[in-house]
Structure formats: C-alpha cells, structure tokens
Image (spheres, rainbow, N blue to C red):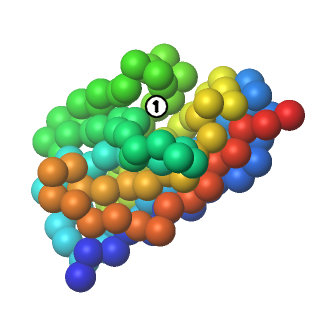
C-alpha cells in the first residue's frame, strides 16, 4: 500500500532554515507528481508546493514562493522541501502526498519561534 513518511521538522528561529524529506513506497514513484501541504492549528490544510513527475516543474503557493524549494530524487523515492527565511506563520504540520491521487503521511511538525 501507499506509504509516505515525512521527516526533518523541528523548532527553528525566524529567519532560519529546515529541510523536510518525504520517503515514498508502495507505488511507482516516478509516475506521480507530488505535493507538500501544511496545516496550522485551527486552519484548513493548504498546498505549499508541487513537483511534476515528467520534467520536475515546480509550483508554489504565494506565501512561500521565493523562500521554499521543492525537489525530488526518483532513485531514492524521496521528495524534499528546502525552507529558508522561515517565518512564524510557517508554523504547521507539513504533509506530503501524491498530487491528485492522495495518500498521506503522518506529517512532521515545523515550529518557527524565537
């Protein structure tokens, strides 16, 4: 079955950086576009970034564009989210998923606070 395991979250000060990873299994990873979502307390889950499967084209939400970079390594069945210049409003649980096909991991907590 589809398994997605996020890691790399933690506590970081404003302006700091984190790199999230999502290890995938149970499906042909290279056939799927992948996305990162996040959910802050009391808010709806929102899409953060997406990467296509064929040509690694990335798109980002306005709130993170220019600060976050998504990438994938098909040899390792893994996607990444490099997060720079983090802000308190980036605090959330971050999830990875197969774009349009679902499957969710347990998420990884990112807390940005001084």
Q: How many marks?
A: 1
Residue in the image at 17% along x and 67% along y: 28
Residue in the image at 15% along x and 58% along y: 101
Q: Would you name the residue on which mark 1 appears?
A: 69
Residue in the image at 38% along x and 55% along y: 96
State the image coordinates of residue 34 (x, y, percent, origin top left). Answer: 27, 49
The image shows residue 20, relative to residue 112, as above or below, that is below
**Label 1 element class:** strand
- Which quadrant: the N terminus? bottom left
**Res 76 quadrant in image:** bottom left
- Which quadrant: the C terminus? top right
**Res 85 quadrant in image:** top right
Q: Which residue reaches farthest front? A: 42
Q: Is residue 93 left or right of residue 46?
A: right
Let me know if residue 43 appears in the view. yes
State the image coordinates of residue 39 (x, y, percent, origin top left). Answer: 48, 47
State the image coordinates of residue 57 (x, y, percent, origin top left). Answer: 24, 30
Label 1 packing within 10 angstroms: few (<14), some (14-19), many (20+)? some
- From the viewer's side, name the closer residue of 27 and 65: 65
């Amino acid at each position: 079955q589809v398994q997605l395991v996020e890691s790399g979250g933690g506590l970081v000060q404003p302006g700091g950086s984190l790199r999230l990873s999502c290890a995938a299994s149970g499906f042909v990873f290279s056939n799927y576009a992948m996305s990162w979502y996040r959910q802050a307390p009391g808010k709806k889950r929102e899409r953060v970034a997406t990467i296509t499967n064929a040509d690694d084209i990335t798109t980002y939400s306005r709130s993170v564009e220019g600060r976050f970079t998504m990438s994938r390594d098909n040899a390792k069945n893994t996607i990444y989210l490099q997060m720079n210049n983090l802000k308190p409003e980036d605090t959330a649980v971050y999830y990875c998923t197969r774009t349009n096909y679902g499957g969710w991991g347990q998420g990884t907590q990112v807390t940005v606070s001084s």
